[in-house]
Image: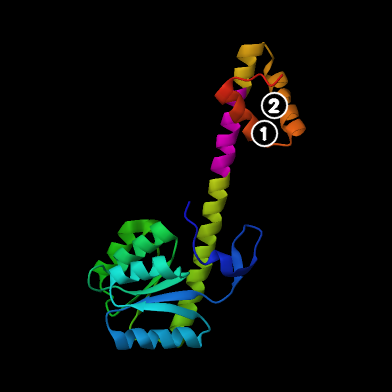
Amino acid sequence: MISLGIGPRTMTKNDKGAATTFAPCRVLIADDEHLVATGIAAHVRELGHKVVGIAADGEAAVALAREQSPTLALLDIRMPKASGVEAAMVLYQELGIPSIIISAYSDEEHISRIQSYGPSSGVYGYLLKPVSRDELRVTIGVAQQRASVDDANSTRIGQLEQNLQNRRVVEQAKWVLVQKSGMTEPQAHEKLQKVARDRRRPLIEIAQAVIQSGDLLA
């Protein structure tokens, strides 16, 4: 499960676990045009966010992200060594960092490329140059909200999958006891629960021990 980097700085959450208010982001900026990058950085600071660094190409952006742990990346789409889309995918899949593409290009080719990657692209917004401060403010806010929802959904799915796996392990442990001791299935389940309570350990740990050792927990 990928954890989106904006999460630790959220201030309040709704009943589904998604944030509803946000603290400032730690922003990485990547653009091979230095004046453009510094202009974007000025807007970001004026909006109250922190700029953790500026990179001149896609590879440098990834290296900087690994070092500085930003919570959001603003990436030019055409850069040397690795494009903004390629960098965004690495940042998202490896580090859980969402990105906003900032580009002078609005042709269908670029949009189709991002769409073809689906959720794995890590792209949470697309802005056309020149970017105003208000456009950046709105797009960052939307990206934060979308990233938080995705993070909450991923967490919930992960919890459901883990619960299902735990139930399977407990069922397997019950059948070990049934086969080795002649207990009924309800008796085996009660036995596992009693041992877990007595030893003050999670039921899943007791079940795993039974499966590994065949111990009847007498």
Q: Is residue 56 magenta?
A: no
Amino acid type at image mark 2: Leu
Q: Tell me residue 72's x, y (percent).
A: 45, 71
Residue 78, image x, y percentages: 25, 74
Farthest residue to the top: give it: 182
The picture places residue 19, in percent across and down from the top left corner, at 60, 66
Q: In the figure, is residue 111 to the left or right of 154? A: left
Residue 170 among those drawn in magenta: yes
Q: Position of residue 18 (x, y in %)?
A: 59, 62
* Left or right of residue 159, residue 102 in this image: left
| Element class at badge 1 | helix
Q: Quadrant of the C terminus?
A: top right
Q: Quadrant of residue 61?
A: bottom left
Q: Earlier in the sequence, mark 2 or mark 1?
A: 2
Q: Which mark is residue 19?
A: none
> What residue did someone put label 1 on?
203
Q: Is residue 120 above or below residue 185?
A: below
What segment is highlighted magenta in the picture?
A: 160-173
Asked if 84 appears above or below 132 in the picture, the reply is: above
Residue at (35, 65) in percent of width and height: 88
| Image quarter of residue 92 | bottom left
Look at 59% across and 39% down and name the residue there. 163
Inspect this view and state whether residue 94 appears: yes
At horizontal 55% and vertical 52% (from top left) the residue drawn is 155
Kindly indicate whether the residue at mark 1 contacts the one at mark 2 (C-beta within 8 angstroms): yes
Kindly report the distance in space between the C-alpha atoms of the residues bearing marks 2 and 1: 7 Å
Which of the numbered marks, if any, corresponds to residue 192?
A: 2
Q: Residue at x 46, y 70 (%)?
A: 70
